[in-house]
Every structure is written in C-alpha cells, then in structure tokens.
Image (cartoon, rainbow, N blue to C red):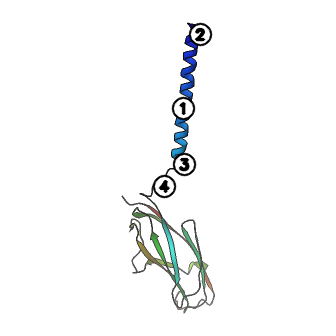
Amino acid sequence: MKKALCIIENIIIILLLIISCLLFVKFIYHINHETLDTTYLWNISYQNFQTTSGSQSINLENKDDSLNFSVTLKNEEEFSEFTIDLVNNGSLDAKIANIDKEIVSTNNVLVASITYLDGTAIKKNDILKSQETKKIKVRIDYPKQKEKIYEALKLDLKLKIKFVPSI
C-alpha cells in the first residue's frame, strides 16, 4: 500500500512538472511573438531648423528634448532669428506642462523672444494635437540704445518645453 501511494505521489509530481514546463514554454513563446501596441504613442520632437534671411549664424544643438543655442551679435544692425517645427507624430494630444528657459547674456543685455510663428506667446497649457506641427520663432536683437555699446554681445539659451498628455 505504501509503495502504491509513493508511486502515485511521484506520478503527480512528474505531471505537475510537465505542466509547469509546458506553461513556461507557452509564456516564452508569447513574449517572443508579442507586437508593440502603438495605440498610445508619444513622439514629440523639434524638426526643420531654418535661419531667417539676413540673420547671423546660430550654433544650435538639439539634445535630450531641449534646444541649446548660442549667437554673437556685433552691432545694432545685426539680429539673429530662426524657426523650428515642434512636431507631435504620436497618437496622443500633448499639453505644455512647463517651459524652462535658461538665458546667459553678455552684461544681461541681449534677450530672446520665443513665440509661435504668428507672434503669439508660447505658454503653459497650450495644446499640440496628435499629428500637428507648430512653428516656433526665436529672435535676438542687438539693443538699440542712445549710448553705443561697441562690443560683441553673446547670448546662450537653453530651451526645454515639457509636455504631458492632454486629457
């Protein structure tokens, strides 16, 4: 009787091991053949950088979802202006959660104006719809003052626009 009970216990253990191995193989197969769900895709980027005619050249770096650029202006006739597309290629609408601007300027004289192409201000809670593109314009002017400055002025700007899903 004890021998028969021992045999039945061993058969049950072997069956449980076989079943668990089959389930493990099925799980691995499912992982290897899983497809990416693109129903909710997040893809916002800066594209299509263009300098305005007559503008001074700009050193631009687009890295880690932020724009870093620097420009040097030498006299009152000089300016620097460029446009860049803010593109949402994802399937979710996006809302601006935060706009971080770090501006470092010689003697704090140069300032950068950052707007949409039509001149409206970029502000928190603006919506960038799915598959939409908005053009951003950045302009830096040499200051027009009664007293001449007579020196080259440099401006460095780091711009980061943080988005969240628009619900």
Give coordinates of residue 108: x percent, y percent: 57, 78
Residue annotated with mark 3: 32
Query: What amino acid type is highlighted by mark number 1?
Result: Ser
First reached walking from the N terminus: tag 3 or tag 2: 2
Residue in front for this viewpoint, 13 or 58: 13
Query: What amino acid type is highlighted by mark number 4?
Result: Leu
Residue in front for this viewpoint, 108 or 167: 167
First reached walking from the N terminus: tag 3 or tag 1: 1
- Dot 1 falls on a residue whose secondary structure is helix
- Dot 2 falls on a residue whose secondary structure is helix
Disc number for residue 36: 4
Residue in front for this viewpoint, 167 or 91: 91
* CA distance for labels 1 and 4: 27 Å
- Dot 4 falls on a residue whose secondary structure is loop
Query: What amino acid type is highlighted by mark number 2?
Result: Lys
| Residue 90 visible in the snapshot | yes
* CA distance for labels 3 and 2: 44 Å
Q: Is residue 5 above or below residue 72?
A: above
Quadrant of residue 17 within the rendered picture? top right
Q: For the residues labelled 2 and 1, say whether their Cβ atoms are less than 8 Å apart.
A: no
Q: Nearer the viewer, mark 2 or mark 1?
A: 2
Query: What amino acid type is highlighted by mark number 3?
Result: Asn
Disc number for residue 20: 1
Neighbor class of circle 1 (other Cα within 10 Å; few <14, some 14-19, many 20+) is few
Neighbor class of circle 4 (other Cα within 10 Å; few <14, some 14-19, many 20+) is few
Q: Nearer the viewer, mark 3 or mark 2?
A: 2
